[in-house]
Image (cartoon, helix red, strand yellow):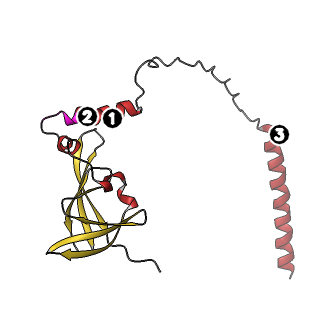
Amino acid sequence: MGVVAFALTACGGDQQELTQWMEQQRREVKPSVEPLSPPKKFAPQPYAMLAGVEPFSSQKLTVAPKQEAKQPNSLLAAELNRRKEPLEAYPIDSMSMVGSVVRAGLPYALLRVDNLLYQVKAGDYLGQNYGKITKISETDLSLREIVQDAAGEWIERSSALQLQEKAR
């Protein structure tokens, strides 16, 4: 019992010594904080290309595909010279494949777009990226799209629509 009392007394003495040391350090150490530099004055620059064509204007966006189509071996040339099909007005992500049928040995896919049902076959076009259906199976529809890559070149991209099961 006496040992415990001695140990507690010893701890109390260390605590007082520690408190004195911390007080001494607070008095001796002066913080050195550098003052903040004042903010720099903002000088707006006038936009020099105000009279030029806006980079995202509809005029510029419609001219670019037409210029690309003038290239002799362009992927886009044949696409711009053909008549558009009704399903090219809708983005692919707004379409869902809800079934497939075979008529006269030819597979057809059933697509739901805006609560209307469309029947499509290989060779038909759909989507806003010049998508052409290449293959139809019971569970999916494969298509080839023509899109611009990061460098602005027109490239072919494969895409697919999967059969959607009815939500319960």
> Crowding at label 2, few (<14), some or many (≥20) Cα neighbours within 10 Å?
few
Q: Whole-Å distance between the Cαs marked 2 and 1?
A: 7 Å
Q: Which residue is mark 2?
A: 66
Residue type indicated by callout 3 = Arg
Which is nearer the N-term, disc 2 or disc 3?
3
Expressed as whole percent of the image width and height from the top left, the position of residue 63 reads 30, 31
Query: Which of the 4 quarters of the picture holds residue 104?
Result: bottom left
Residue occupying the point 28% across, 44% down? 149
Q: Nearer the viewer, residue 102 or 72?
A: 102
Q: Is residue 10 visible?
A: yes
Which is nearer the N-term, disc 1 or disc 3?
3
Which secondary structure, mark 2? helix
Residue type indicated by callout 2 = Lys
Q: Is residue 126 left or right of residue 35?
A: left
Q: Nearer the viewer, residue 52 or 7?
A: 52
Which mark, residue 62?
Answer: 1
- Above or below residue 68? Residue 23 is below
Which secondary structure, mark 1? helix
Q: Main secondary structure of the magenta part?
A: loop
Q: Which residue is mark 3?
A: 27
Q: Which residues are magenta?
A: 68-72
